[in-house]
Amino acid sequence: MLGPNGAGKTTTIEILEGLTLPDSGEVEILGTPWRDGAAGRALRERLGIQLQETQLADKLQVGEVLALFRSFYRQSHTVDEVLALVGLEEKRKARVVTLSGGQKQRLAVACALVSKPELLFLDEPTTGLDPQSRRQLWEIIRRFRADGGTVLLTTHYMEEAERLCDRVAIMDHGKIIAQGTPKELIASLGADHVVDFALTEGGIAADLVEVLRQMGGVSAVRTGPDGVSLTVVELHRALPALLALLQDRGVELSLLTTHHASLDDVFVALTGRQLRDT
Amino acid sequence: MYQLALSRMREFYREPEAVFWVFGFPIVLAFALGLAFRNTGPGKLQVGVVAGSGDSALAATLDSSPRLIATVLDTATARLRLKSGRVALVVVPGDPVVYRYDSTRTESGLARLEVDDVLQRARGRRDLVAVRDDRAVAPGSRYIDFLIPGLLGMNLLGSGIWGVGFSVVQARQRKLLKRYMATPMRRSHYLLSFILSRLVFLIVEVVALVGFGWLLFGVAVRGSFASLGGITLLGSFAFAGLGLLVASRARTIEGVSGLMNLVMLPMWILSGTFFSYSRFPNAMIPFVKALPLTALNDSLRAVMIDGASVMTLGTPIAIVVAWGAVSFVIALKIFRWR
C-alpha cells in the first residue's frame, strides 16, 4: 500500500489487523471476519503484526523480548530461529535501548515473525532508516515471501513498493486510487519515459504547451512551479523534437533530465502532486 | 502470563531508581525516624540562672540534680535562650526566687517541678508520704514499634500503585499495549501478570522492612507470620487493583502521576502511618477508617504489636478486600487497551 503521509495507510492496516473498528464495511482476513474472544485469538495465531509506533521495553534484552512474544502463541519459532531470520544473533543479550534504529526495526519485525505467520502486516517498516538497514529489511521480507508467506506492507517510498511488491495499491486521502502490479501501474501512464525541463525565463507560454501536446511521442504534458514534465513513449524521437522546437522559439533550457517512468510518476499523474513532497 | 510477569520484574529490577524508592527509601525512613524518636527517656533539662547575688551557689544546687543542667547567664542571653527553647526555664535569684517559663511547654512544666523540688529540698523540705517508684516499659509501645507496620502499609500502597500504574501507562504511551492486543494474548493474563509480579516483590518488601526493624530496633512480630503474610498479601492485591484502576484510562505518565498523588496523598496523611489517626476530629474517624491503608495499617499493627490473629480482624480485612475487588472490576470494565 503506497501513499503519502496522512493518506490513511495506517488506519487501513489497523482496521485490517482488527485493532481499529471500521466505521462501515466488512473485513475478512484469511477468509474470516474479526470476532471477539476465542475466534479472534485463533485468527491472531496466524498473523504477524508490526505496528508503526511501538516502542519495545528498553530495559529488556532482545532475547527476552522475543521469549515474551513467543509465549503468546501456541506454535512459534524458537528465539534462536527468529534471531537468525532477522540477523540479530549476536544481539541476543543486548538491551533494546542499546540497539540502532535499524536493529530495533528488525527486532519489531522479529516479534511479528515469531508466530510463524501466514500473513505478515508491516506498517512503514523502513521509514527513517538508512539505506543499508532498509536493504537488510527488504532481504528479510523477500525471504519470508519466498517461503510462501503473504505480506501486506505500507510505505511512502515508491522504490520500496516497486522492488518488493507483487501488487501495489496507491492510496490518497483515504481512498485507493489505483491498483495493480508495479508494471501495470506504470504502463497505465501510456509511456515509459519522463522528460523534465525548465526554461531560463521561468514560465512557459500557453501556446508552447499546446504545441508540446501535439508533438509526436508525447502522451501527457504537465506544468508545475519547477518546470514542465512530459510523459513520452519514444524518447529517441521526442527529445530531438523538443530541443528543435525550443531552439526555434529562441528560448533557453535551464534544466533537462529524463528518467524511466516510476510509481512516483503514476502518483503525480493521478493526483497532480509529488509523492515525496507530501 | 509467567513471561509477562517475568518481563515486568526484569524491567523493575533493572531500574535502580525504582528499586531504591520501593525498597531502600522505607528503610532509610525507618532508620531516620527510629533514631530521631528512640525512647531514651526524658533527657536532662537545660535551666538558666540569671546572674545576680548568689547565682553560682544556686546553679551548683540545681546542677546537683541528675535531671538538670544549670548555666549562669546574663539577663538578655537568658531571655533569648528561653525564647528559642534552648533552656526550659530561667531562675532569677533573689527573694522571692522567680521562675520564668512558658507554661504551655511540657518541658518547661517538668523543669518547674524539678527545680522547685531541688530548691525546697536544699532548704530542708521533707517528704511526708513514703512512696516507691515502679518503672515499667510496655513492649511495643515505642514509636518505632508503631512506625514499622505503618511504613510497611505505606510501602505496599506505594509499590502497588506506582509499580502497576507506571508500567501500564508507559506500555500504553509507547503503544506496547496495542502491540500486545495484536497478539493472541488474553487480556486477563496481562492484568493478572501484575498481581503475580507484585506477589514476588511483596515477599522481598516485607522481609526487608520487617527484618530491618527486627535487626536494628528489635521490633518483633508478636502475631503469627502466617497472619502477617496473609494480610500483606491481601493489602498488596488491593493496592495492585487500585493501581490498575488509577492507570485504566490515563494516556500519559504526567496524567497518571497526578491521579496517583490524588489517591495516595490523603492516605499518607490520614491513615495513621506516622502518627495515630485518633488525633483527627471524631467526625472524620469513620471516613478515615474506611480508607484501605487505614484498614491495612490497623490490621498490621494488631498482628505485629498486639499479636492478634487474622480471625479477629474481620472488619478491616473486609475493607481492604472490598477496595481491591471493586477497583479491579471497575478497572477491567473501563480499561483503555490502546
Image: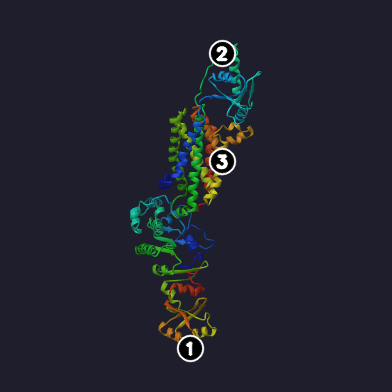
The local secondary structure at tag 1 comes to: helix
To the question of a shared chain for discs 2 and 1, the answer is no
Note whether residue B311 is visible.
no
Observer-nearest of B36 and B334: B36
| Label 3: few (<14), some (14–19) or many (≥20) C-alpha neighbours in 10 Å | few
Q: Amino acid at mark 1?
A: Asp
Cα distance between the residues tagged 2 and 3: 49 Å
- Count up the numbered dots: 3
Residue B36 in percent (x, y) is at: 51, 31
Q: Which mark is residue B222?
A: none
Observer-nearest of A185 and A198: A198
A25 lies left or right of A97:
right
Question: Chain ID for label 1?
Answer: A
The local secondary structure at tag 2 comes to: loop
**In front: mark 2 or mark 3?**
2
Q: Which residue is mark 3?
A: B265
Q: Amino acid at mark 3?
A: Leu
Question: If you read the primary sequence from the N terminus, does the residue marked by circle 2 or circle 3 appear first?
Answer: 2
Q: Which mark is residue A248?
A: 1
Whether A217 is drawn above or below A127: the answer is below
**In front: mark 1 or mark 3?**
1
Q: Quadrant of residue A43?
A: bottom left
Residues tagged 2 and 1 counted as in contact (Cβ below 8 A): no
Q: Which residue is mark 2?
A: B131
Q: Quadrant of residue A99?
A: bottom left
Whether B329 is drawn above or below A5: the answer is above
Residue B49 in percent (x, y) is at: 60, 23
Note whether residue B217 is visible.
yes
Observer-nearest of A35 and B240: B240
To the question of a shared chain for discs 1 and 3, the answer is no
